Image (tube, rainbow, N blue to C red):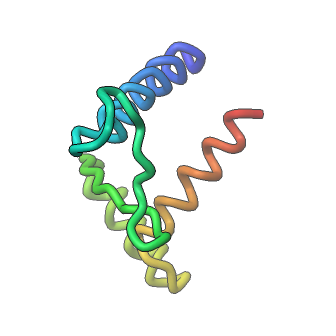
Amino acid sequence: MVKKAKKDFTSGLDMLIQKTTVSDEPGTTKGEVREESKGGKEIGKQITITIPSSLKREIKIYCADNDISVKDLIIRSVKRYMKVDAD
């Protein structure tokens, strides 16, 4: 079941990446991928998810206790998950 979930997540992520990086700007060819940066910094994208309210409360408490923003916790957690899952 984990393999199927990973495959579904990966294929969905690939589709999302393709949709967000194809440029429709003048001077680019159809399907050309543009670098998403502004002034040397990567452009941020917003993701909206729904989680149980009890988990949100736990996350906020953890972040307050450990002096970390929710955003940074989520980014670090996803990166760590993807690194471990790739092994």
Which residue occupies 35% across, 27% down? Answer: 31
Which residue occupies 49% across, 70% down? Answer: 40
Q: In the rendered view, would you say 12 is above or below 55? A: above
Q: In the rendered view, would you say 64 is above or below 21? A: below
In the picture, measured across the screen, residue 17 lies left or right of residue 67, that is: left
**Quadrant in the rendering for residue 71:** bottom left
Q: In the rendered view, would you say 21 is above or below 8? A: below
Which residue occupies 41% across, 38% down? Answer: 33
- Quarter in which the N terminus is drawn: top right
Residue 3 in percent (x, y) is at 59, 16
Q: In the rendered view, would you say 64 is above or below 55? A: below
**Quadrant in the rendering for residue 34:** top left
Residue placed farthest to the right in the image? 87
In the picture, measured across the screen, residue 39 lies left or right of residue 45, that is: right
Q: Nearer the viewer, residue 18 or 25?
A: 25
Residue 64 in percent (x, y) is at 44, 83
In the picture, measured across the screen, residue 72 lies left or right of residue 81, that is: left
Residue 10 in percent (x, y) is at 49, 26
Q: Nearer the viewer, residue 30 or 45?
A: 30
